[in-house]
Structure formats: structure tokens, C-alpha cells
Image (tube, rainbow, N blue to C red):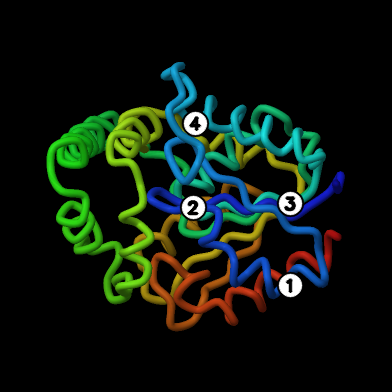
Amino acid sequence: MVSAAVVFLHGFLGAADDWDVIIHALAGEYPCVASELPGHGANLHHPDAQTYTLTGAAANVQRKLDARGVSSGVLVGYSLGGRVALAMVAAAPTRWRGLVLESVTPGLITAADRAQRVAADEGWALRFEQEPLAEVLRDWYAQPVFAPHPPDADLLARRCRNDPVELAKVLRGMGQGVHDLLDGVLARWPHPLLLLAGEHDAKFQSNVERMRHLCPRATRAIVSKAGHNAHVEQPDAFLRHMRGFLNTLM
């Protein structure tokens, strides 16, 4: 067991093995661990609804890391995993020495935007509960945020392993419309922060700029030829940014 590690958190619909290529490339240089969020992979069927919230997910992941002997290090979160990472550092600000956020939104600012997102997430949650998973996933990945890099057949097949009822719980409990704005966490973060977005992901490049102005220790990096899921679409470019950041910390 290791006390310090690079900890990878996947996004919505993902699993720990989403990070296999990145972890394999870094494993000879840094201890690496990937942890699954509640509602994904084998981390399922929690009786307490609180587990399917950002704070509950953060506590759940931290317990799993504690059981593996990981007490500190660098958190790397993609999309939903990035918001869970922010909840983890809010709960234990002295535990982590670095933070990497890929394609992350720290929350929606206006009440109208939050209400709109809650309604949209509820629509998706109902579809996950009531319709064939493959059909819902087809439409999910047709959303503009995933253009121009929709998932390939292999990734879609892996996404079909999910439990759709669990996915609905995640959307209702961890969606951007229901959790508190995380800007304050970024403003208080005292350690290095790397903000990543894909070259073709204009929306999340805007989020990077917003977060960079909130956190004085933040640096930004744009991953060339990538969209929303940069570490899958362009792993070599993603790794160059990661190594440059980790070399200053571990």
C-alpha cells in the first residue's frame, strides 16, 4: 500500500478502467490509483440516498482510498469526477497537494440555469429508467458537448455495462443543478491546480478561464485535437500536460 498517489476519478457513465491507458503510461513514474464513483462500475446499490450526492460520493471515494492506504497525493477528476474531487478537497483541504480538473464545471451560477439543468437531468433520468440503455446512450452522446468526437463502438459497449437505475440516481443527486456552487472551493485552494480542456470544447475552455481567475495557483492547458473527453481522445497530449504538472509535485 502507498500513502501518496495520483488518484483518478472518471466522469458520468465511466468506470475506473477509463484511465487504464493513462495509468499504464505513468505507473513507472508515480503510484496511481483509479476509483469508481457511486452508481458506476462495481460501486452500486447504496441504501443511503446521500451517497448519490457530491458530498456523499466524496466520502465514499475517500473511504475506499483509506482502505487502500492512500492518504494524500494528487486528485485528477474528469467532468463529474472533477466535481467530486472538489468536494473531496473541500472536506479535507490539507490531505491533497495538487489537483487536476479536466472538462469540469464548478456549478451553475443562476437559479434559472440550475432549474433548467434539474429539469433536463430529470428527463434523462426517466429515459435511463424506462428505455433501452443503448438507445438512451446513442442520444446522450449526440449532444453538442461531445461533438466532434463521439465515442467509438468499443466505448459505447463499455458504457452499456452500466446499471441504468443507478445512473438515474446519479443524475438526480449529483447533477449540476442540485449541488452548491463550488467556486468557493477553488478560491480557497492553496496548492497547484491544472485546468484542462480540449481544443474543440469551447464551452469548457470558457469554464477553464472562469476557474483560472478564481484560483491564484491555477494554470491552464488546452489539449490539441481533443473534445470533451481529452484523456481518451488524445492520451499522448494529455500525458504531456500531466507529466509537466506532476513533476513539480511528486
Q: Which mark is residue 57?
A: none
Query: How far apart are labels 4 and 2 at the CA level?
Result: 17 Å
Tell me the crowding category of disc 3: few under 14, some 14 to 19, or many 20 or more residues within 10 angstroms, Cα based.
many
Tell me the crowding category of disc 2: few under 14, some 14 to 19, or many 20 or more residues within 10 angstroms, Cα based.
many
The amino acid on which the numbered mark 3 sits, given as a three-letter code, is: Val
Looking at the image, tell me whether mark 3 or mark 2 is earlier in sequence order: 2
The amino acid on which the numbered mark 1 sits, given as a three-letter code, is: Arg
Q: Are marks 3 and 4 in contact (CB under 8 Å)?
A: no
Residue 213's x, y, as percent? 57, 52
Looking at the image, tell me whether mark 4 or mark 2 is earlier in sequence order: 2
Residue under pointer 4: 54
Residue under pointer 3: 74
Q: Are marks 3 and 1 in contact (CB under 8 Å)?
A: no
Residue under pointer 2: 15
Tell me the crowding category of disc 1: few under 14, some 14 to 19, or many 20 or more residues within 10 angstroms, Cα based.
some
Looking at the image, tell me whether mark 3 or mark 1 is earlier in sequence order: 3
User: Secondary structure under badge 1?
Assistant: helix
Q: Which mark is residue 243?
A: 1
Question: Is 179 left or right of 65, judged from the image as shown?
Answer: left
Where on the picture, by quarter, is residue 171?
top left
